[in-house]
Amino acid sequence: MMAVKRLKHHKIKNNKREKAMNKLTVTLLALLLPFIIQAENIKALVGGVLIDGFKDQPIQNSVVIIEGERIKAVGAMGDVEIPAGAEVISTEGMTVLPGLWDMHVHLQINGHADYKHWHSTYPPRFEKEIMPASAHQLLMAGVTSARDLGAPLETIIKVRDAINKGEIPGPTMYVSGPFIQKAPYPGTELYRWGVDGASDARAKVKKLADAGVDVIKLIDQDQMTEAELMAVVDEAHKHDLPVVAHAHRPKEILLGLKAGVDNFEHTGLSTAPEYPPEVIAGLRERAAQMNIGPLFWTPTVEGLFNYDYVKNNTEKFDNSSWHLDMPEDIIDDIKQSITHPERLPYFQITSKRKPTLKRKIQQLRDAGVVLMIGTDSGIPLKFHSQSTWNELDIWVREMGISPMEAIRGASYWPSVMMKVDHEVGTITEGKYADIIAVKGDVLRYINLLQNVDMVIKHGERVK
């Protein structure tokens, strides 16, 4: 009987001890959980050659500490402590650099050669299929920020917001919505808005601003009245929106300069061998005005320069990277449209423009404008998965621009132009962790960017 009582007493004692231990374990876990979660949310990129976007020379054997969405520390191995419990990601043998920007894309199109057919067939599929596919392809190519310069307003705003909320994959998007011009071309009213007088110009810009666009896109400004043009730029600046304008003709550029345009697009002037003296004089005068910041220019030369190669090497189209997320029937339609790239009316004068590009780029650089990477990605034969690295390659290999300058044109300067350089554009403590990594030495072989091995956007490894 006494033995039974002793056994019961022992069990009760053990139960109490067990409960006490469980309580202590729960308490300790509660205390330690924030630190465990924090450690799980810390990444350390270790060992690569780092191009931070500021320095002229890369950091060898680099360390980048990412905590959550942001960069916590940057430096060399031995100088930066790797937190205990961090996820260590080796970047040995790789170039680590800021996520790329593409400052001129069109998510609504994806390489199809017949605009009339495309825009009469696919607008109902822009929001749910085509634009998300285009955005995902850009992201997988290492583009973590992009500027869409021409799309239906409501659709592009919805897609931008879905990406920025993390609902669909893609770069952080900055969008213009429809172009502003004197009169839209027939059949393009969905993504082009005409203006009739200065008050209408202001009303159209205000409508875009109220909808939440990030930039105003202006084209054919030489066809507007001066009052209309001034109204567009002034109203945009009142809403703190930069103005991007085409630069196809000398008068477009000169009027844009007079109105205070912030950023010109394309090299323009068709087959003319160079910009005329009055244009260069205007650019130099504007570039000298330090108090209003740089004059930006997105030359978009790759599509022009590479056309001869592309039309004679159609195997390039068999690279299936542009198929990502795209429905099969649309892939087949695009393929059919580019069966004979040499016959496309869109490009018949392109071969004659090619010899003028290097001179025009040099003139722009000499005039003091700041060049940025942009591609017009989505136009015929131009796929979102391939455009950006090709532009960088042509800048370096053909235009004589140093790899470091080209990379800054695809990272730091776009962030300055869009007034978000306090958040992105360089690999700097406190900024969002938008980072890519590529096997090999990008500063020696810029075309390695055609195969981006790792993409981190806002601290999340998406590739």
Image: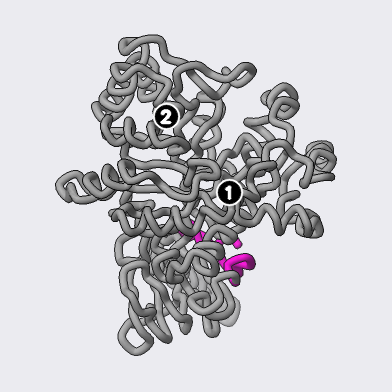
Q: Does the rendering let one see residue 285?
A: yes
What residue type is disc 2 on? Leu
Compared to residue 115, the image places residue 33 above or below, namely below
Q: Quadrant of the N terminus?
A: bottom right
Q: Is residue 13 left or right of residue 216?
A: right
- Image x and y of residue 106, in percent: 57, 39
Name the residue nearer the viewer: 380 or 173. Answer: 380
Name the residue nearer the viewer: 205 or 209: 205
For the residues marked 2 and 1, what is the alpha-carbon distance in whole angstroms? 23 Å
Q: Residue visible at 80% across and 55% down?
A: 314
Q: Which three-letter amino acid code belongs to the residue tagged 1?
A: Arg
| Mark drawn on residue 353 | 1
The residue sitting at the left extreme is: 291
Q: How many marks?
A: 2
Residue 395 image point, x, y percent: 50, 63
> Which mark is nearer the camera, 2 or 1?
1
Q: Would residue 443 be counted in the magenta stretch?
A: no
Residues drawn in magenta: 448-463
Q: Is residue 395 left or right of residue 28?
A: right
